[in-house]
Amino acid sequence: MALLGKHVILEMKGCCRDIINNVSSVKNILKKATEISNATLVDVICHHFSPYGITGVAILAESHISIHTWPEHEYAAVDIFLCGSAMNPHNAALYISQAFHAKETFTMELKRGDFLLHEAETVCRQYTLDQYQSLLQK
């Protein structure tokens, strides 16, 4: 069975409170992350919680990108799940980390649909933004 998709999970600390608590900013970041990953945007939906925090979802033809923010902790959690081999979720992950001005980013990648090969692998790593960016440039 071929790999069906990649699911990248981001944990970001030290994010800019003003950006991760602004619905317009989060929507624009979701749209740009979709474009950067070569995915097809279906819709973007965001909800602002009171007194702060946002949940946003970009619904994609190839799956989704979701963002959950806690500005009071300068923290954001992101899921990027893209099906197919033409898209790169790490491009979206790097962009979101940069757009949120994250001081530290932890990533985990799940290879979806790979379980029948008995070689399923979960890769967990913690990076600063500079380390993550240099890794993706290799």
Image (cartoon, rainbow, N blue to C red):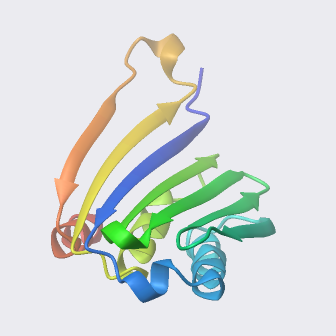
Instruction: Examine the rendered structure and indicate whether residue 107 appears above or below residue 71.
Output: above
Residue 70: x %, y % from top left: 43, 65
Q: Looking at the image, which is closer to me, 38 or 8?
A: 8
Instruction: Examine the rendered structure and indicate whether residue 136 appears above or below residue 101.
Output: above
Residue 34: x %, y % from top left: 63, 70
Residue 84: x %, y % from top left: 64, 46
- Residue lying furthest right: 42
Viewed as shown, does residue 71 lie left or right of 43? left
Which residue is drawn at the image coordinates 37% and 18% (left, top)?
A: 119
Quadrant of the drawing holding the N terminus: top right
Which residue is drawn at the image coordinates 64% and 81% (left, top)?
A: 23
Rendering quarter of residue 77:
bottom left
Viewed as shown, does residue 123 lie left or right of 94? left
How many numbered marks, from 0 up? Answer: 0
Q: Looking at the image, which is closer to me, 54 or 42?
A: 54
Q: Looking at the image, which is closer to me, 37 or 2?
A: 37
Rendering quarter of residue 40:
bottom right
Quadrant of the drawing holding the C terminus: bottom left
Which residue is drawn at the image coordinates 58% and 48% (left, top)?
A: 81
Which residue is drawn at the image coordinates 41% and 11% (left, top)?
A: 118
Residue 5: x %, y % from top left: 58, 40
Instruction: Examine the rendered structure and indicate whether residue 63 appears above or below residue 93.
Output: above
